[in-house]
Amino acid sequence: MSLQGPGTRLGLSSVAVAAGVAAAAGAAQLGVGYGLGVFSWVPTVHGGDEAAWLASLAWTVWISALSVVLGAVVADRVGQPTVQSSTAVRVLRRAALSIAASLGGLVVVALTAVPARVAERADTFAPHLIVGAYAIAGVLLGLFISVAALVARSIAANVLATGGWLWLLAVTAVADGIAAGRDPVVAQLGSWPVTTDGPWFKSVYLPGAAIAAVAAVVIGFLAALPAARRRDGQAGVALSGAAGPALVAVAYLLAAPRLTGALPDQLSAHLVAPYAVVTGLLGSVLALVLCGPRRPRPVTAPAAPVPPQYTGSDAAPAPAVPAQPVPDKTGSGKKASDKNSAAGDSSDKAASDKPASGRTAAGRATVAKATADDTAAQPPADEPSATGAMPSTGPSGVSPVADPPGPRQPRKKR
């Protein structure tokens, strides 16, 4: 059976992995907590039974929620689909993994309710039912967080990193108490009493508040950094820093909605938890600002290149400028024309006296020479001559000087 068709590895095996990992994670956390005395249902300190009870309830909510998130995330990474799927199929897949992980997380209900039967409470005759209800509330909380963690990988990274940090802090607090020879006490969720006498600011233990704030910023930044570099959804990356601290704050809120009669350490932990949400959010937003996508710069169109001017030997010649007419100082244009005509008649007459074999060559040479002379001396047709008279034109509209007669044909002998 497969929810995404052939080519995928998502099926009953992934659902089983989600349920199995959630159950194993819950059992492992409870085993460490019971073994090290991080939380307990039996009063361990005289007069501190109320603080131990509330701290154990907060740990119960946290452990059950973290187990569900861990099971869903691990199953999602193990059973990644190998083909592209539609949005509806992805939603069904994530819902199936979250529900399966929630079913596995119900193991925490049994492992906490059964030991809680030995608890002595004056306000209830069935403390195990209260503990079981808190464990179920944690499972439901983990169900919603796991859906968000499957949508945004940065949220999953933040919740898991916060869980690892809280357990490291709890183990450190217990080990520090044992090394100092103090009586064993229940560790507050996300708090470590570094010193026994403060400093305090009103009801806030400053060393514990500083540790919680710095840890939230660092975890929020480091968990969101890879997602920001991958260009994941900006909304998921920006909100990921608040996921883990918000889960801790909700656990405290469910454990003690009213802080009447709470001990100073417990009161400080409850008051610091909401501020850790804000600092964690600042860390993820900082990662998005530093490594997120930036607006592209406006691209200006380059100026059109000017074609180079070629001055080589094969460059095109410059356009010819027509020669300006030179005024005739010796006489009018009419006399020059008559002179040229007389010269042309004399040359034709001389050419006719020569033998027929040489007439053609001599006539062509004479005509070419006369044409060159007339072209140089003749002004343009649309300009008047030096005397102000327009040059005479022939029947075809062309000046006889500009259109010299061709060579005459030799006469036939009678």
Image (cartoon, rainbow, N blue to C red):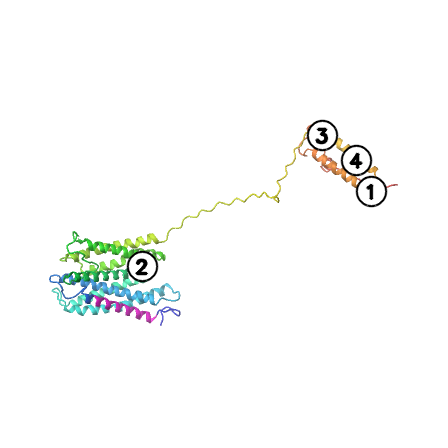
* Residue at 77% over, 35% down: 344
Q: Residue 85 in the image: x percent, y percent?
A: 38, 65
Circle 2 is placed at which residue position? 154
Depth check, front residue: 198 or 370:
198
Q: Which residues are magenta?
A: 11-32
Which mark lies nearer to you, 4 or 1? 1
- Distance from Cα at disc 2 to Cα at disc 4: 109 Å
Sequence-wise first label, 4 or 3: 3
Residue 383 falls in image quadrant: top right
Instruction: Tell me the quarter of the image containing the N terminus.
Output: bottom left
Residue 406 visible somewhere in the drawing: no
Circle 1 is placed at which residue position? 357
Sequence-wise first label, 4 or 1: 4
Q: Which amino acid type is marked by label 2?
A: Ser
Which mark lies nearer to you, 3 or 1? 1
Q: Residue 371 in the image: x percent, y percent?
A: 73, 37
Residue 261 falls in image quadrant: bottom left
Q: Which amino acid type is marked by label 1?
A: Ser
Q: For residue 333, which numbered disc appears in the image?
A: 3
- Disc 4 crowd, CA 10 A, few/some/many (<14, 14-19, 20+): some
In this rendering, the answer to whether 202 lies above or below 389 is below
Sequence-wise first label, 3 or 1: 3
- Distance from Cα at disc 1 to Cα at disc 2: 110 Å
On screen, residue 114 versus residue 324, left or right, reads left
Indicate yes or no whether the magenta region holds residue 407. Answer: no
Q: For residue 347, which numbered disc appears in the image?
A: 4
